Amino acid sequence: MEAARIIIVGGGFAGATLAEHLNRRVARDVEVVVISSDNHMVFTPMLAEVAGRSLSGFDVVMPGRQMAPRATWLTATVTSVDLKTNEVEYTRPDGKRSTLSYAHLVLACGSDVNLDVVPGMAAHAYTLRTVGDGMVLGNEVIARFEQAATEPDDAERQRLLTVVVVGGGFTGVEAAGHLFDMMRSVKPYYPQLGRNRPQMVLLQRGARIVPEFQHDSLSEFALRKLRQNARATRPPYSHRGERLRASGARTRNWLGLCPRCGTCSSRSGMRGLC
C-alpha cells in the first residue's frame, strides 16, 4: 500500500512552519512534500532592515530543507490541482511539467500585491516582498543620492531626496523608519547636497497608522516619533508618472515604495507564483 502523502503548496511562514511541525508529529511512513517557487523561507518582517542596510539579506532567509529536514522540498511552480484525482500539477525549473498525488493538500500561498489598484503605481512604485526587493530598494535610494550629488538644480535635488511610502501598517512604518535612518546616515558623505535634506513621506489610508496595534495611544506614539523627522498624511492619492497627489497635499515628486498596499488573497498556486 502506498504511503500517505501530504502536499503543502507554498514555502512561506505557514507552509514551512507546518512542514516543520508535521515532521515531528506524523508517522515516519507519511511523506510531507513542500512545493514552492523558492528553496527558502523569507522572514518578511525584517525586510525593512535589509532595505535600510542594517541587516544583510542572508540574515532573513532560512533554507527550507534545513527547517524541515524530513520533508521533500520541490522548487517548482504549481499550475493546477485536480480535486477529483487528488493530483497536483507543477512546472519544474527546466520548464517540464509533472504531477504528484496526495492524500491531503494544504494551500499556503499567502497573499499577492495588486499595484493596479492605484493608477500609475505599478509603473513607478517598489514593493517589499522579497530579499531582492529589499536590496533593490536600498540600492535605489543610494542611487538617488548619487544622482542628486551631480544635479545642479536645487528643486530637482530635493525631489531626488524624497521618498514616499504608501501604507502605514507595520511594514510601511518600519520601512519608512529604516530607510530614513539610512538616508540620514549617508547624507554627510555627500557634501555637494548642502542644505538639501532627505525627506520621508508616509501615506496611510484611515484614521491612524499601525492599526494592528488596536490601541489609539500606541498608534499616536508611533505617529509622533515619525513626525519628528518625516511627514505623515492620509490618502486618497493618485499618481501621474513620478508625481503623486494626496488629499490635502500638493502634488509631489517621489521615489515610491508600496510594501503592502493592494494586498489581496493569492491564488498563486493556480497562477504560477507559489
Image (cartoon, rainbow, N blue to C red):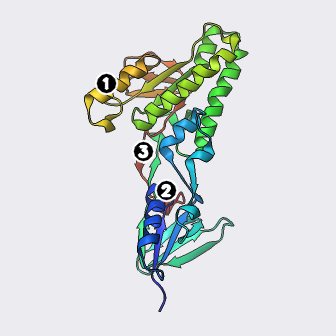
Can residue 127 be seen in the rendering of this structure?
A: no
Image position, residue 264 (x, y; %): 40, 48
Q: CA distance from mark 1 to mark 2?
A: 32 Å
The image quadrant of residue 36 is bottom right
Secondary structure found at label 2: loop
Q: Nearer the viewer, mark 1 or mark 3?
A: 1
Q: Nearer the viewer, mark 2 or mark 3?
A: 2
> What's the mark number on residue 12?
2
Q: Name the residue type under label 3.
A: Thr
Taking 218 as reference, is 146 left or right? right
Q: Which residue is at 47% across, 22% downward?
A: 201
Q: Which residue is mark 1?
A: 220
**Residue situated in front as seen by the camera: 152 or 181:** 181
First in residue order: circle 1 vs circle 2: 2
Secondary structure found at label 3: strand
First in residue order: circle 2 vs circle 3: 2
Taking 185 as reference, is 13 left or right? left
The image quadrant of residue 159 is top right
- Determine the residue located farthest toward the front in the rendered image: 24
Image position, residue 197 (x, y; %): 57, 13
Secondary structure found at label 1: helix
Pointer 2: residues within 10 angstroms few (<14), some, or many (20+)?
many
**Residue situated in front as seen by the camera: 198 or 70:** 70
Q: CA distance from mark 2 to mark 3?
A: 16 Å
